[in-house]
Amino acid sequence: MTDVKAIAKLMWELEDQLAVCMRCGMCQAVCPIFMETGKEADVARGKLVLLDGLLHEMFKDPKGVAERLNRCLLCGSCAANCPSGVKVLDVFLKARVILTGFMGLSPAKRLILRGMLSRPDLFDRITQWAGRFQKVFTRPANEVIGTSCARFAAPLLGGRHFRPLAPAAFHQKTPSKDTPAGASGQRAAFFVGCLIDKIFPNIAEAAMTVLEHCGVGTYLPAGQGCCGIPALSSGDRKTFLRLVHHNLALFEEGKTDVILTACATCTSTIKKVWPAMVADQPEELRRRVEKIAEKTTDISAFVTRLIDPTKLTAPAGKPPVVVTYHDPCHLKKSLGVFAEPRRLLAETPGCRLVEMAEADACCGMGGSFNLQYYEISSRIGRLKRDQIVATGASAVATGCPACMLQISDMLSRRGDSLRVCHPIEIVAEAMGSS
Ligand code: SF4
Ligand code: SF4
């Protein structure tokens, strides 16, 4: 069981934050789950009321509390629209930590989070091994999107169309990098993130191309770990803190001006969640985390200031891409980044940006939410798919690899054939990379 003192501290922090909610219910209008289920228990207000009596409820029905807490995408739509400024995501994450401290981790989660995720080397080796054998169990589903589906009945995969593990992870092709500042006079560290490393290495390769084109020196430390959000979402603060320490040690080196990521969830985790979740830790750790959080920026937001569109050319021999952009919740709602990726796409030769309706509506992915509540996740995802297809675009770009997974699944399952990519890939192609 997690340290009782730490749990008690979290309880006090939680009480202070819960007191801010005035029960106005304005979060109902923006919660994607509430819009589908209509249940007060699913919306932020309903969960906050439950947490008000957490101690009592936890002893009475811990599984029931966990079920209610887990029915949440952690999208932050409620927090972004809350007139009282309730830090809803902090509250939900802390409550999950308290509950896991009380109930313990399930054996499966213990194995995945503590046995694998918290040990980046081992995690890399296991996924490398899984990548070699995945074709035995899966078959291609949609060539344009690049999805696969299960070859045999597989309860965990269900009918999902997923993006398979890449033949070689990014860290295998480019284990590390350390180049001097170029014309921009700046050096950037690059935090790869698990999904980009193992499923979408093209995004990291495109990021390297764009940084080089912009004259930015790159620092890519070897042995990077996960940002920790999958562990924290499961209430496993021990693994989360271990990964924070691991990555801090890597990214404090390298004398860089900025730390970039191409994953909206990693960016918002490092910038917002790391500081919030070390508030009770020693001052030295808090200071180190604050420093890293301040330096961390989304790659589109950073490069948009440096790119000169007149130096880009449309890829030769390819028809223009008509692209629509989906706002990842963790980029727009958490960090206010939405204009920059659009500007990048609109200014890239050979690319025409068309807006979809409700571009900032959540795609319904929510990490482990998709695994646990696939039916609700798909209902939300299908709304996003329909808005994408209605634009007539030939590609959809988004700044989060997790959203890319969900959008790929939704499009592929219906047989739609649109390219699903990251804005940085389209920009890199106009720099001669394809
Ligand atoms: S979380 Fe915010 S929006 Fe929701 S009920 Fe409380 S104060 Fe209102
Ligand atoms: S984080 Fe998203 S899914 Fe969870 S309660 Fe808030 S709006 Fe609803």
Image (spheres, rainbow, N blue to C red):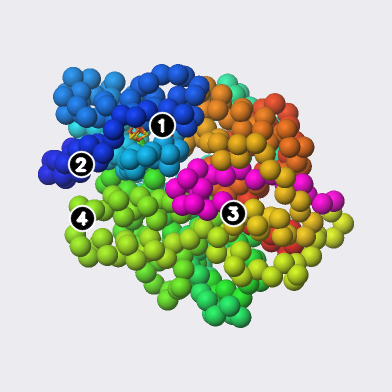
Tell me the kind of residue under disc 1.
Cys
Q: Using the rendered view, name the quadrant where residue 301 is placed.
A: bottom right
Q: Mark 4 sits on what residue?
A: 281
Image quarter hosting the C terminus = bottom right
Query: Is 40 included in the stretch rendered in magenta?
Result: no
The secondary structure type at the circle numbered 4 is loop
Disc 2 vs disc 3: Cβ atoms closer than 8 Å? no
Q: Nearer the viewer, residue 235 or 15?
A: 15
The secondary structure type at the circle numbered 3 is helix
Image coordinates of residue 223 in percent, x first then y, are 43, 60
Disc 1 vs disc 2: Cβ atoms closer than 8 Å? no
Sequence-wise first label, 1 or 2: 2
Image coordinates of residue 74 in percent, x first then y, are 41, 37
Image coordinates of residue 219 in percent, x first then y, are 49, 70
Tell me the kind of residue under disc 3.
Ala
Q: Which mark is residue 156?
A: none
The answer for how far apart the CA atoms under marks 3 and 1 are is: 24 Å
The residue carrying mark 1 has its beta carbon less than 8 Å from ligand 1? yes
Question: Is residue 249 positioned above or below 38 on the image?
Answer: below
Residue at x 16% of width, y 41% of height: 12
Q: Nearer the viewer, residue 177 or 203?
A: 203
Q: Which mark is residue 16?
A: 2
- 282 relative to 269 in the view: left or right: left
Sequence-wise first label, 3 or 4: 4
The answer for how far apart the CA atoms under marks 4 and 2 are is: 18 Å
The answer for how far apart the CA atoms under marks 3 and 4 are is: 35 Å
Q: Mark 1 sits on what residue?
A: 27
Q: Mark 3 sits on what residue?
A: 339
Sequence-wise first label, 4 or 2: 2
Task: Tell me the magenta residue range.
Answer: 319-338
Image quarter hosting the N terminus = top left
Disc 3 vs disc 4: Cβ atoms closer than 8 Å? no
